[in-house]
């Protein structure tokens, strides 16, 4: 998984450019957010620190602040313009902090997070060992990880339409639920539960879908993407291919959404680290009196 096929700088640029338009197009994101809020019901403690990774414009962080009024809520995103836009959702009555950071390198101490929440962000990270290893590092023992991500059937119609035009990747590739589950277990997360839902959104024409993807920042960030402007013929061939997929007069777009939760491992459970090997952490108190003469 370390041979990333995503261009991280392009992901950052795409979302930075979409900061002012994102909330005009985020109906699906808000629907999926409601599924994640339901999963928070599994966490029965009162959290001290809650983080929202890939917080975007801050809608989710504001909902977490409302759910956990006594907790420190931190919105984290790799795109600074998104965090600037999130300020409008951080009220003086229910404020949350905003931190620019990547999901694979969170600026937090070990075992300092009670709830780690992420709504439709993890699909942009294909180094799963680094991602879930970092989740394990920052979660307290028994802390809750809850996230959503896109699966491989997402935008399958658009991908098929582009395949009629040329053989270049125009639609980002997303990972299968089973790969996610295996990576979560390998990282040491406990009792993962994953579910898949499929949504079909419809549009008057293919261009409206493309406009929405651009407004969300969810445009192609594949390292192998074409770097130059596409010819008009390629674009027209794609549009013509997509037109053949109309259902009841509308253009369909499938979104495969994986929602999941898991728990931080108990103290002393080893965790894998980048480059191989494992680390096990114990409190000093737990080691006292265990040494035999």
Image (cartoon, rainbow, N blue to C red):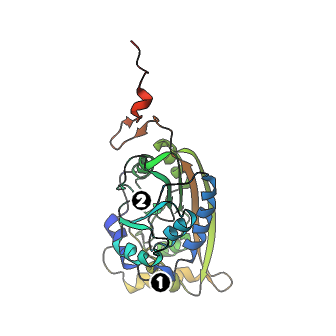
The front one of 243 and 156 is 156
Relative image position of residue 228 (x, y in whole percent): 30, 77
Q: Secondary structure at mark 2?
A: loop
Residue in the image at 44% along x and 30% along y: 286
Using residue 162 as the reference point, say whether residue 44 is left or right of it. right
Instruction: Tell me which corner region of the image, top left, top right, bottom left or bottom right, holds residue 225.
Output: bottom left
The front one of 41 and 263 is 41
Relative image position of residue 189 (x, y in whole percent): 51, 45
Using residue 227 as the reference point, say whether residue 113 is left or right of it. right
Relative image position of residue 234 (x, y in whole percent): 42, 81
Residue in the image at 36% along x and 81% along y: 230
- Which residue in the protein does label 2 denote? 125
Q: CA distance from mark 1 to mark 2?
A: 23 Å
Q: Is residue 265 above or below residue 246?
A: above
Using residue 49 as the reference point, say whether residue 200 is left or right of it. right
What's the mark number on residue 54?
none
Q: Is residue 183 above or below residue 204?
A: above
Q: Secondary structure at mark 1?
A: helix
Relative image position of residue 87 (x, y in whole percent): 41, 76
Instruction: Tell me which corner region of the image, top left, top right, bottom left or bottom right, holds residue 81.
Output: bottom left
Q: Residue furthest top?
A: 293
Labels 1 and 2: the sequence-earlier one: 2
Q: Neighbour class for label 1 at 10 Å: few (<14), some, many (≥20)? A: few
User: Tags 1 and 2 in contact by the CB under 8 Å rule?
Assistant: no
- Report if residue 15 is visible in the image: no
Quarter occupied by the C terminus? top left
Instruction: Tell me which corner region of the image, top left, top right, bottom left or bottom right, holds residue 148.
Output: bottom right
The front one of 165 and 101 is 101
What's the mark number on residue 211?
1
The front one of 272 and 178 is 272
Q: Neighbour class for label 2 at 10 Å: few (<14), some, many (≥20)? A: many
């Amino acid at each position: 998984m370390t041979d990333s096929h995503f261009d991280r700088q392009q992901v950052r640029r795409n979302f930075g450019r979409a900061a002012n338009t994102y909330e005009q197009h985020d109906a699906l994101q808000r629907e999926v957010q409601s599924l994640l809020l339901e999963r928070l019901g599994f966490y029965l403690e009162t959290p001290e620190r809650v983080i929202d990774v890939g917080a975007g414009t801050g809608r989710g962080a504001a909902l977490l602040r409302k759910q956990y009024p006594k907790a420190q809520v931190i919105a984290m995103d790799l795109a600074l313009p998104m965090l600037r836009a999130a300020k409008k959702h951080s009220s003086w009555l229910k404020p949350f902090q905003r931190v620019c950071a990547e999901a694979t390198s969170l600026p937090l101490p070990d075992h300092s997070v009670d709830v780690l929440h992420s709504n439709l962000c993890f699909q942009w990270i294909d180094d799963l060992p680094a991602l879930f290893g970092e989740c394990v590092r920052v979660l307290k023992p028994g802390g809750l990880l809850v996230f959503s991500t896109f699966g491989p059937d997402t935008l399958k119609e658009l991908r098929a339409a582009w395949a009629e035009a040329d053989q270049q990747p125009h639609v980002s590739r997303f990972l299968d639920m089973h790969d996610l589950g295996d990576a979560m277990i390998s990282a040491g997360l406990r009792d993962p539960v994953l579910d898949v839902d499929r949504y079909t959104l419809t549009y008057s024409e293919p261009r409206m879908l493309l406009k929405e993807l651009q407004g969300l920042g969810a445009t192609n960030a594949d390292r192998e993407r074409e770097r130059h402007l596409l010819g008009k013929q390629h674009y027209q061939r794609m549009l013509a291919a997509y037109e053949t997929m109309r259902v009841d007069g509308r253009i369909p777009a499938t979104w495969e959404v994986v929602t999941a939760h898991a728990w931080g491992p108990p103290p002393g459970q080893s965790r894998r680290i980048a480059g191989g090997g494992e680390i096990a952490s114990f409190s000093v108190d737990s080691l006292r009196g265990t040494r035999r003469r």
